[in-house]
Image (spheres, helix red, strand yellow):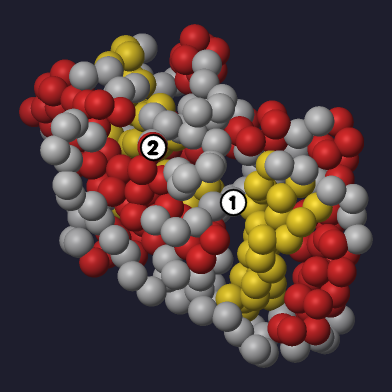
Amino acid sequence: MEIIKDVKAMKAYVKAIKTKGETICLVPTMGYLHEGHLDLMRMGRPLADHLIISIFVNPTQFGAGEDLDKYPRDLPRDTRLAESVGVDCIFNPEAADMYPQGYATYVNVEGITEGLCGASRPGHFRGVTTVVAKLFNIIEPDISVFGEKDYQQLAVIRRMVEDLDMNVKILAHGTVREEDGLAMSSRNKYLNPEERKNALVLNRSLKFAQDRVQSGERNAAAIKSEVEKMISSTPGCTIDYVEIVDPDLLHPLDTLETRAVMALAVRVGKTRLIDNITLTA
């Protein structure tokens, strides 16, 4: 397995692959890999001749006061894990190489970036789409795999790829959870034992919402209200948002018809966690 840090070297590596007519699957990550990341890689491994992952803590998607500086990083650990699932190459650039002095170009997807995490993290998705567009240009993947835990991010990337006629197929992998139901996230590392226990209310509240829909409830406001009470009554939990949205356009729904997504973001202590579920009537 190779580790490449230089953009030009990465392009040369890709050129050699493309010259042979071989295919690439890319799994973009910010590192500190967990089983959820590894499942994305396992999904991608048989789909292309070469499996490449990126490990890059992207500064442009972090806002003021967010956890850019303390975001967990451990390249030796990540290297061992990536190699264990058959990754061929890790692209691990420096921020100064991705955003050199004078950098001034950004990709902005409108509409679906405005609610949910886009409302509480201004500029976040501009950073996400910019770095993913750069990775697609550098690595030229035929396929790229993203997790459904970041549901809005997945929708935004799909929109960008379609709108800009990018020659890459986006595949989604379902949310990977711990045995107790907590969605896997690199930020789970921040939680102390009590917070870790309290964080289970996220998945519990989503399951409750699905049960309410299965019981015949169709009023989105009623379901949201009950979920908000569950979360707010859990010690140390502060709601950023709880929304029920159209699964494609991500605009809020008043009434559930056949399918919707409940998405939520909650601070457990100082740690912001997200999760979602597809509600089916």
Q: In the picture, which quadrant includes the N terminus?
A: top left
Residue annotated with mark 2: 59
Answer yes or no: is residue 72 visible.
Answer: yes
Q: Which residue lies furthest to the left in this view?
A: 19
| Residue 270 spot, x, y in % from top left | 71, 42
Q: Which mark is residue 51?
A: none
Question: What type is the residue that disc 2 sits on?
Answer: Pro
- Residue at disc 1, secondary structure: loop
Query: Which tag is nearer the camera, tag 1 or tag 2?
Result: 2
Q: Quadrant of residue 178?
A: top right
- Residue at disc 2, secondary structure: helix
Point 25% across, 56% down: residue? 107
Point 43% across, 53% down: residue? 124
| Residue 136 spot, x, y in % from top left | 24, 42
Please rate how many residues cluster around mark 2, counting C-alpha atoms within 10 Å: few if below 14, some from 14 to 19, many from 20: some
Considering only vertical position in the picture, is 178 above or below 236? above
Looking at the image, residue 36 sits to the left or right of residue 64; the answer is right
Looking at the image, residue 179 sits to the left or right of residue 170; the answer is right
| Residue 191 spot, x, y in % from top left | 76, 34
Please rate how many residues cluster around mark 1, counting C-alpha atoms within 10 Å: few if below 14, some from 14 to 19, many from 20: many
Q: Residue 149 carries which label?
A: 1
Answer yes or no: is residue 46 visible.
Answer: no
Point 33% across, 70% down: residue? 110
Looking at the image, residue 249 sits to the left or right of residue 135; the answer is right
Of the pair 128 and 119, the residue shown nearer to us: 119
Looking at the image, residue 52 sits to the left or right of residue 80; the answer is left
Point 90% across, 50% down: residue? 235
Of the pair 246 and 65, the residue shown nearer to us: 65
| Residue 194 spot, x, y in % from top left | 89, 36
Q: In which quarter of the image is residue 211?
A: bottom right
Q: In the picture, which quadrant includes the C terminus?
A: bottom right
Question: What type is the residue that disc 1 sits on?
Answer: Lys
